[in-house]
Image (cartoon, rainbow, N blue to C red):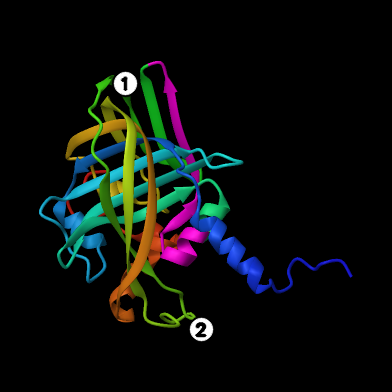
Amino acid sequence: MARVRYGARTEAEITAARTASAKLPHIWSTGVTAVWETDPDAVAAVLPPPLKPTARPLVRVSVSKVELPGYPLGAGSFAVAAAHDSVEGWYPLVMPMTHERALTGGREVFGEPKKLGEVTVKRDGLVVRAALARHGIAFVEVRGAVTGVLPLPEPSRKTDFYFKCLPAVDGSGFDADPVLVHCVREERVRKLEKVTGDVVLRESMYDPVADLPVHRLLEISLGEKTSDQRGRVVERVAAHALLPYLHQRYDDPFQALDAPPEGSAR
């Protein structure tokens, strides 16, 4: 009988697959990163406990084209600055990906809030445009022009915070207590340029990032980077504490009924 590929793998095959994935070469991406100060109350509102705001209410959006072997990947992240105990890092609210393979691995292994979407990074001469779009709405757009070369930073370590969880089978709560994951990335940069421009946030009921407006744009850059990542579970989180934030991970149609924060401009 011909091999049935959905059948069980042998121990040797499982070991070979694990070994191969652990020896991936450095994969370089070309991407735009923008950082700005926003409303501190808005940042505090989106952070599930035990995460807390940092001293500055920062938002970071990154939009990248990743040269994966075999096919290019568009990858994005919209994150706010956060702290867990003494560790400061970033808490992503949405991470659009252009391929399901990148989406499932990140969500199931690390708990990343990845969703299928459109990711655009274009450069025409000095003019740069990067955008994250879903459901036909470019809810984040970064646009500008390259105005100079920036010094290359030293290799750095960055931490992202994720909550790994599974909604309960009966539709009420979770099957087990969620866990908080620290995902640490070692990042290297081989090219970095300054971009002068602006960030546009558009209204979307599925990706309501417009609630974190640009009060003061701090930087826009275009760079070529590579990084590796490793995650670890640091603590279990009470289900009742995370449940009010669960809609961040899914396309919740009831978000259309939510009002923006008081006093926010649309």
The answer to whether residue 204 is magenta is no
Q: Considering the numbered disc 2 on the image, is that residue within a helix, a strand or a loop?
A: loop
Q: Quadrant of residue 87?
A: bottom left
Residue occupied by mark 2 = 170
Q: Nearer the viewer, residue 100 or 243?
A: 100
For the C terminus, the image quarter is top left
Classify 242 as above or below 169. above
Q: Amino acid at mark 2?
A: Asp
Asked whether residue 254 appears in the rendered view, the answer is no
Asked whether residue 20 appears in the rendered view, the answer is yes
Residue at image location 53% in from the left, 42% down from the top: 68
Residue occupied by mark 1 = 145
For the N terminus, the image quarter is bottom right
Q: Considering the numbered disc 1 on the image, is that residue within a helix, a strand or a loop?
A: strand
Q: Is residue 36 left or right of residue 175?
A: left
Q: Nearer the viewer, residue 6 or 142?
A: 6
Can you give x and y, in whole percent of width and height, for residue 233 in the image? 34, 72
Q: Nearer the viewer, residue 32 or 154?
A: 154
The answer to whether residue 120 is magenta is yes
Find the magenta span and give its range.
105-125
In the image as oriented, which residue stretches furthest toward the right?
Answer: 1
The mark closer to the camera, 1 or 2, is 1
Q: Quadrant of residue 237?
A: bottom left
Q: Is residue 263 left or right of residue 74?
A: left
Within 10 angstroms of label 2, few (less than 14), some, or many (20 or more) residues?
few
Q: Amino acid at mark 1?
A: Ala
Number of numbered discs overlaid on the protein picture: 2
